[in-house]
Image (cartoon, rainbow, N blue to C red):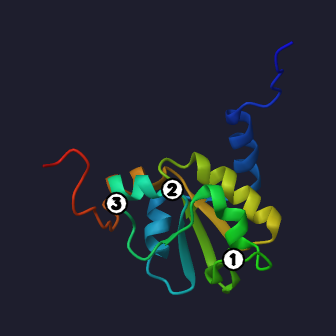
Amino acid sequence: MGQKIILGVDDLIDEAEREIETVSVRQAMELYGNPDVAFIDLRDIRELEREGRVPGAVHCPRGVMEFRIDPKNPSHHPVFSADKKFVFFCAGGLRSALATVVAKRMGLHPVCHMAGGYVAWKRAGGQVELPEHAPGED
């Protein structure tokens, strides 16, 4: 007998977006540079090496986020103990929606996610730090 999945990823994302604050790229750009705001990049390190990064954003891969947020965990990142607003983002805004709802449930606040993620940020002319040598270049 096969598995019967009752909630698909689209359902989970829809549920998350009903529970969390979503900011547009323009709104995120207005927050960028504010010392009371921390941008949290949830992408995998390979994505950063390939696509670049938002300068000053804290890299916190989605796979370890809960450990970085938890102050009792040895992997805790001190940014999550700061009195800041947290703007989560990933490549396109899906992982960050799911991550934001988990972070909110853990007690992190205020926390939101950026619609469209890093791709939308780059397209809108947001500040980026590109890799020195993109894969495939000689």
- Within 10 Å of disc 3 (Cα), the crowding (few <14, some 14-19, many 20+) is some
Mark 1 or mark 2, earlier in chain: 2
Amino acid tagged 3: Gly
Q: Is residue 45 visible?
A: yes
Residue lying at the far top in this picture: please name it: 1
- Within 10 Å of disc 1 (Cα), the crowding (few <14, some 14-19, many 20+) is some
Q: Is residue 61 above or below residue 97?
A: below
In the image, which disc is placed on residue 43?
A: 2
Question: Residue 80 vs residue 19: left or right?
Answer: left
Q: CA distance from mark 1 to mark 3?
A: 24 Å
Mark 1 or mark 3, earlier in chain: 3
Amino acid tagged 2: Arg
Camera-nearest label, 1 or 2: 1
Q: Is residue 85 above or below residue 93?
A: below
Residue 16, horizontal then vertical, whole percent: 73, 49
* Tag 3 residue: 52
* Tag 1 residue: 76
Q: How many marks?
A: 3
